[in-house]
Image (cartoon, rainbow, N blue to C red):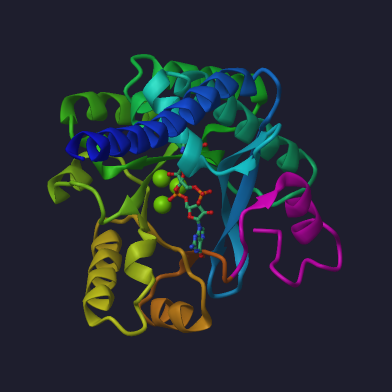
């Protein structure tokens, strides 16, 4: 009996594990080819100035149009890309594509706003990151101050490495934004050491902000900290008018979230925000 139970238990576990492993291996193989096969696509989510609902920036968010599995979100494949080293090629593609698209929009008469690009920890720690960012900017023609790189607090823990990289990027004119702020391990003293232009308050503090006083207090503190350090501050994940009202009440001028817009394909960005006559919805001139 013991033997049978054990055997069944083992088989069940093993089959499940095997499935997971199998699909991961499959995805990994597919992901290696995805860049080459042009299956990756950037979506863009507007960042809005609450006061007049103008777009003040736009964040590039990668999607994978998988040939059989449909559209996959970065939460599924970025971790695989990081584990396998595919992230370098993928990250380079994202950076180049975001810069190319933004430059194209600028030339087409779109607003002169920056594009934000998420970096993985591994990319951030590449020895020649600053040089290759420069190369991509030169190649695409995008001016450095129209590129904003999003990093997280945990990436700055190795202070000596981070200082060198961030100073190089800063001297070149690229902007740095701290993503998911408040969720990572961070030392507040790092904030004054590094050239950080913008702090993004993580969505987890916004979700329950209408009823949770602790979240309210944390958000207020981040906003005033950013103001004192002369950094811009933006709140992520605004989904409702009630959340927006609390944030504007607390002097948070910049907002990103489904309430204003979900991430859109490049074509939808143009349709929603470029077509004359629709500009009053959320203006597309800065
Ligand atoms: P993130 O950089 O913090 O991006 C914000 C995520 O929140 C996006 O999910 C966005 O679609 C979602 N979001 C925005 N507004 C709302 C809202 O109002 N409510 C809710 N529930 N969600 C909202 P997405 O696109 O699935 O990306 C997830 C994460 O994947 C990103 O978090 C970022 O860390 C990573 N990621 C995305 N694109 C890239 C990339 O090109 N490179 C790297 N390294 N990471 C990326
Ligand atoms: Mg981000
Ligand atoms: Mg992020
Ligand atoms: Mg975030």
Residue 172 visible in image: no
Q: Position of residue 41 (x, y in %)?
A: 66, 36
Image vertical order of residue 258 relative to residue 13, above or below: below
- Residue 275 horizontal side relative to residue 61, left or right: right
Quarter holding residue 261:
bottom right
* 178 and 11: which is toward the camera: 11
Quarter holding residue 210:
bottom left
Q: Quadrant of the C terminus?
A: bottom right
Residue range of the region highlighted in magenta in the rendering: 260-286
Q: Does the magenta portion include 12?
A: no
Image vertical order of residue 248 relative to residue 1, above or below: below
Extreme-front residue of the structure:
1
- Residue 262 horizontal side relative to residue 274, left or right: left
The residue at the point 51 percent across, 30 percent down is: 23
**Which is the main secondary structure of the residues drawn in magenta?**
loop
Q: Quadrant of the N terminus?
A: top left
Q: Position of residue 146 (x, y in %)?
A: 56, 40
Extreme-right residue of the structure:
276
- Residue 276 horizontal side relative to residue 259, left or right: right
Q: Position of residue 250 (x, y in %)?
A: 35, 78
* 12 and 45: which is toward the camera: 12
């Amino acid at each position: 009996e013991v033997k049978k139970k054990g055997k069944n238990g083992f088989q069940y576990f093993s089959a499940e594990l095997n499935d997971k492993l199998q699909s991961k291996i499959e995805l990994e193989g597919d992901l290696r080819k995805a860049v080459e096969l042009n299956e990756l696509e950037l979506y863009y989510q507007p960042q809005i100035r609450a006061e007049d609902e103008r777009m003040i920036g736009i964040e590039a968010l990668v999607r994978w149009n998988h040939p059989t599995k449909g559209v996959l979100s970065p939460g599924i494949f970025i971790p695989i890309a990081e584990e396998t080293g595919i992230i370098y090629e993928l990250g380079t593609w994202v950076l180049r594509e975001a810069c190319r698209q933004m430059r194209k929009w600028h030339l087409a008469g779109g607003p002169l706003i920056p594009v934000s690009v998420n970096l993985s920890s591994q990319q951030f720690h590449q020895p020649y990151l600053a040089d290759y960012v420069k190369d991509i900017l030169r190649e695409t023609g995008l001016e450095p101050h129209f590129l904003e790189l999003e990093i997280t607090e945990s990436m700055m823990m190795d202070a000596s490495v981070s200082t060198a990289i961030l100073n190089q990027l800063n001297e070149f004119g690229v902007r740095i934004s701290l993503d998911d702020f408040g969720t990572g391990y961070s030392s507040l003293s790092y904030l004054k050491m590094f050239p950080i232009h913008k702090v993004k308050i993580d969505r987890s503090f916004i979700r329950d902000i209408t009823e949770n006083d602790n979240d309210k207090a944390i958000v207020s503190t981040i906003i005033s900290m950013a103001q004192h350090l002369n950094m811009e501050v933006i709140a992520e994940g605004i989904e409702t008018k009630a959340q927006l009202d609390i944030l504007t009440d607390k002097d948070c001028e910049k907002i990103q979230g489904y309430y204003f817009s979900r991430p859109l394909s490049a074509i939808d960005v143009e349709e929603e925000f470029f077509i004359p006559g629709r500009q009053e919805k959320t203006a597309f001139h800065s």
